[in-house]
Image (cartoon, rainbow, N blue to C red):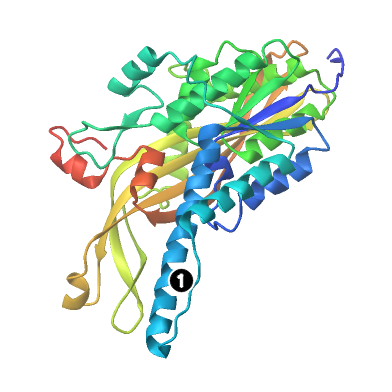
Amino acid sequence: MPKVKFEPPPPHVVVPDTNILWDEDKKNTVSPAFNEFWKESAPLIRLSLTVPEVVFGELHFQQTTSAIKLAKNISQQIADLSGITSMKYDARLDPQKIRKQVGDKVQKWVKGLKGSIAKTPVDSVDWARVVQDAIWRNEPFTYDPKDKDKDKEKGFRDALILETVVKVCEENKGTINNVVFLCNDFLLKTAAEKRLKHNPKVLIFESLPEFGAYIKLTQQKLTDKFVKSIQNHARSWFFTANDATTIWYRDRIRKTIRNEFSDRLAAEFESLSNATGLLGVPVPYHWKVINEKWRIRGTRFDELIAPREYHWISQITVAQLVSGSASRGGLAFALMTPREEVRLANFDIKWKADVKADGRFYNVTVVDILETGAAQEPSTEEALDRWGLQPAAAIANAPNPAN
């Protein structure tokens, strides 16, 4: 294979969505995983951070809301203490001051990474198109999962983030920079891919590991053009809708996973619930799958074997809405409220391909299929929306229910 001339990778402008930075522990400005990723990646490739105004605002709002809620609890406890002691105590917890302090904290984090905040381009947005997308629920807009009549839509903040990403791409059009959009929201990611598909300087990844694998690929002494070319080819080789030659269809990946992991994806199963009985013993539940979505996620570079054999990992997540009821334990357990949860199963499809100097793939072969983790979480509105699952009530009321 002819050698591909090496050139250092160009600078990458990294634009993260809220879900990439979010952390459940609001004491953390952002996810520790993101900070660790940045620390490890910065020495390998030139990165600059651009945070959309809406993403900054979401972090600011979420953390301020948590802080003010905590402040109210503290104020109530201090009031109770004053009542008990007949002494006046004052915590001086000002919500506006808390809001400013949280904003300052997030600003400090952005500046600490020498980043910037990108304003929402309200003056240049095609609002007529946004209105039509909202009306017709085009990505990134979607139906509100709680609305059984499907009259309400969600996605306005995501639409503003997308407009900001597009603006950042336009601003970098005349530079050597690549623009990386990190987004773990399926609808927003899909909308961004459609909107920016003709921009060769844009890379969209749904996770830090996927972006990290791309950075790893840039260290293989390849040109930037070649790296992006084979990254895109790898994605399309694994799955292109209605293309029977791609791995997903050719190797019947869905059927293979169902056969090899039938226990994991069973339509009915039993497990111990988080609920406990009278003696504190976990209650055994019988679960049924109500509906299911298969999500083809990112394809990432794994390793380079010899000069031309590239190994890849494509991830599949199967999300199931399951309904469960106590299966044993007598009348007391039988009267317990049925539960709905989301069951997740993740799979890695490991495959390889020989790659020619012009980026063409051949000898494409599946190496292995591995289960990489499973989880069960409450069927919250956010979880249903994230995985594209319909609430059980909506399915029950539908004229033609479909799994």
Which one is nearer the viewer's eye here, 318 or 11?
A: 11
Please give left or right for residue 58 compared with residue 34 in the image. Answer: left
Q: Please, what is the three-letter code of the amino acid marked with disc 1?
A: Ile
Q: Which part of the image, by quadrant, shows the N terminus? A: top right
Residue 288 placement (x, y as % from top left): 27, 53
Residue 307 placement (x, y as % from top left): 83, 24
| Above-or-below relation of 157 to 179 | below
| Residue at figure coordinates x 83%, y 38% from the top left | 43
Which one is nearer the viewer's eye here, 264 or 233?
A: 233
Please give left or right for residue 260 compared with residue 84 in the image. Answer: right
Q: Quadrant of residue 56?
A: top right
The residue indicated by pointer 1 is 74
Q: Quadrant of residue 391?
A: top left
* Disc 1 residue crowd, few under 14, some 14–19, many 20+, Cα 10 Å: some
Please give left or right for residue 267 compared with residue 180 in the image. Answer: left
Please give left or right for residue 78 compared with residue 131 in the image. Answer: right
Which one is nearer the viewer's eye here, 60 or 270?
A: 60
| Above-or-below relation of 263 to 74 | above
